[in-house]
Amino acid sequence: MALLSVDEALERILEGVQPVSAETVPLAEAVGRVLAAPIEARRTQPPFDASAMDGYAVRDADIASTPVTLKVIGTSAAGKRFDGEVTAGTAVRIFTGAPLPKGATTIVLQENARVIDEGRIEALEPAAPGRHIRRAGLDFRSGDTVLEAGRTLDPAALSLAAASGHAQVPVIRRPLVALIASGDELVPPEAEPGPDQIIASNNFGVAGLVQQDGGRVLDLGIVPDDHAGFAAAVRRAREAGADVLVTLGGASVGDRDITREVLAAEGMELSFWKIAMRPGKPLIFGRLGRMSVLGLPGNPVSSLICAHVFLRPLVRRLGGRLHAPNLHQAELGAPMPANDGRRDYVRATVVPGPGGLIATPFPVQDSSMLSVLAAANALIIRQPHAPAAEAGERCQVLMLR
Ligand SMILES: Nc1nc2c(c(=O)[nH]1)N[C@H]1C(S)=C(S)[C@@H](COP(=O)(O)OP(=O)(O)OC[C@H]3O[C@@H](n4cnc5c(N)ncnc54)[C@H](O)[C@@H]3O)O[C@H]1N2
Ligand code: MOO
């Protein structure tokens, strides 16, 4: 039977997935979060007609012909307005952001005025009515929707939410992703591996991807290849309310590859196992209650590439974020052999060339080699059964950074 294609696998993973629930957070902690509801302004900004410059608030008719001497009758500062009125032949000293006094219709810039003495200035240039005045509500008015639901709170959005009177904002909860690494051979990086052991690395890269996409990670550590320990960790993920459980390793067909068996015994409804992808063929996916379960292959490169292709879109969808893989067209920098029936994600370097991007595959593609993946900035995507390709032919690349 033909293996499930990568696109069908992704469709199944995302099927019916909705953003998780909302929570309210203080603005100071909201950078990068996604708004769960629109933000309506609680105030009008500016709240009053205000000067945009330092200078003098005057009546435009009084300075139609210059130079002209005006009597300075007071000061309007940001935070303390002048309560009187600008009448014929008078001016009020004004500063940027200060309320425009009654009667004034324009601002003479400080640079266009000469101070004669404490009570008088000479206006040197005429100014049109409304010049350098910000009208009340220029930015937004009370009740306006200033930010839409789904908006990522970037710095400008944070300042706008604050200016419109919000000290806290409703955001989509960060999706919780639980990680379990399985394998008798695995030890954490701070430990000294025994003679037949290696260091568990996959959880760090996968956790990094989750965090980059706005998720939270619950690392449940390493479980040996035994049913009871593994099952207990799966239950901890459920009890913690994880939105996604990612298992690392044990996905293939070896005697110790017990991941599917444990997940099935815990009640996972299997959606698929094995897909037409290299690396990553033994990928497992299913649902356990409301928790999506993604069983990544143990080989470190397979884990991370599958996480790029499948986990990132899932975490982003749960977190209310759009996902657009960073795909580009490039020219091959070296020939490539014909492909078999699996879509191949080939570690490569992409650099700018005279006619566009040039993508050169690394000569060694073993799915255990993290040094190659870390040196690669892109994956060349080879479709199933793609014929051999010469250097210079077009190819599609997925940028990794
Ligand atoms: N007879 C077959 N053998 C294999 C097949 C197959 O179809 N038939 N598929 C191969 C492919 S493709 C892959 S990918 C691997 C994946 O197998 P598993 O998911 O069962 O992974 P493990 O056997 O547990 O581990 C493979 C490899 O990766 C190391 N590993 C595991 N977990 C971690 C971790 N958290 N951090 C770092 N390294 C890890 C583990 O020590 C092994 O060296 O199966 C092929 N075999
Ligand atoms: O599909 Mo495996 O992931 O080639 O190493």
Image: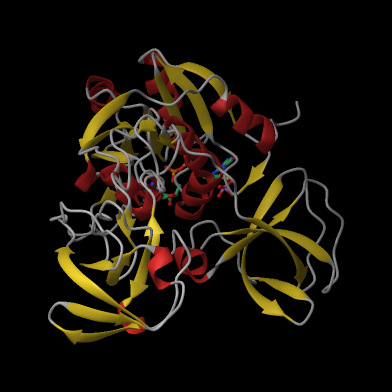
How many tags in the picture? 0
In the depicted view, which residue is nearer to us: 48 or 333?
Answer: 48
Which of the 4 quarters of the picture holds residue 197? bottom left
Q: Position of residue 377 (x, y in %)?
A: 55, 67
Q: Is residue 116 above or below residue 11?
A: below
Q: Is residue 260 above or below residue 310?
A: above
Q: Is residue 167 above or below residue 157?
A: above
Q: Position of residue 261 (x, y in %)?
A: 42, 21
The image quadrant where one finds the N terminus is top right
Please tell me which residue is depicted at 51% across the width and 30% down the height of the picture. Answer: 284
In the depicted view, which residue is nearer to us: 205 or 61?
Answer: 61
Q: Does 297 sit left or right of 22 as displayed?
A: right
Please tell me which residue is depicted at 60% across the width and 54% down the height of the picture. Answer: 326
Do we see residue 205 in this rendering? no
Q: Position of residue 152 (x, y in %)?
A: 41, 43
In the depicted view, which residue is nearer to us: 102 or 390?
Answer: 102
Do we see residue 55 in this rendering? yes
Q: Is residue 9 above or below residue 301?
A: above
Q: Position of residue 300 (x, y in %)?
A: 44, 53
State how the image is colored: secondary structure
In the depicted view, which residue is nearer to us: 68 or 395?
Answer: 68
Q: Does 61 sit left or right of 111 as displayed?
A: right
